[in-house]
Image (cartoon, rainbow, N blue to C red):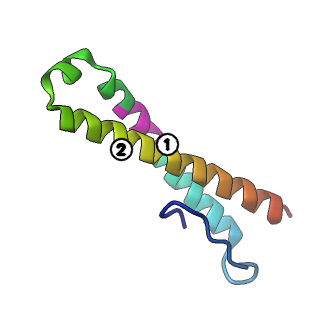
Amino acid sequence: AVSGEFNVYVDIEGNIDISKEKNRLNKEKQELAPLVEKWKEKANDESFIKNAPESEVEKLKERIKETQDRLKRIDSLLEDLNETFSN
C-alpha cells in the first residue's frame, strides 16, 4: 500500500494476486494524475491566486506536492513489482 513517507516491503509471493495489485496501483495512478493536472491549473490561475486566501493557495500547493509524491511512489512500487514478478 502507498501510505506514509516510506515503503515497507513484505514477502507477498503466494499471498496476494500480483496482477490484481498492479491493476489496483494503476487504477489509483489513473485517478490521481488528472487531479494533479486540474489542481496545477487552479494553482496557476491568477484569479484564484489573487482572490483566494493565502492559506487556501498553500493548501492546494501542498495537496499537489503530496499527490505527486504519492504518484512517484506508485510508479516505484509498480516498477518493483514488474522487476520482481516478471513472468
Q: Position of residue 45 (x, y in %)?
A: 28, 19
In the image, what residue occupies the spot 61% across and 65% down? 7
Magenta-span inclusion, residue 53: no
Q: Is residue 41 above or below residue 31?
A: above
Q: Name the kind of residue labelled 2 in the image.
A: Arg
Q: Who is closer to the viewer here, 20 or 13?
A: 13
Which portion, as a residue range, is magenta?
Answer: 33-39
Q: Nearer the viewer, residue 61 or 40?
A: 61
Element class at badge 1: helix
Left or right: where does residue 9 sit relative to residue 13? left
Q: Quadrant of the N terminus?
A: bottom right
Mark 2 or mark 1: name the one nearer the start of the chain.
2
Instruction: Tell me where residue 77 appears, x and y as whole percent.
Output: 66, 58
| Residue 61: % across, % down | 34, 36
Measure the C-alpha gap from mark 2 to mark 1: 8 Å
Q: Residue at x 48, y 40 (%)?
A: 33
* Residue 63: numbered disc: 2
Secondary structure category for the residue under label 2 = helix
Q: Which residue is mark 1?
A: 68
Give above or below for 28 relative to 41: below
Q: Is residue 11 left or right of residue 8?
A: right
- From this viewpoint, which residue is outermost toward the bottom? 15
Where is the C terminus found, in terms of image quarters? bottom right
Q: Amino acid at mark 1?
A: Gln
Residue at x 51% of width, y 51% of height: 70
> Would you call the spot at circle 2 few (<14 residues within 10 Å), some (14-19), or many (20 or more)?
some
Q: Where is residue 34, by image quadrant?
A: top left
Q: Position of residue 54 (x, y in %)?
A: 19, 32
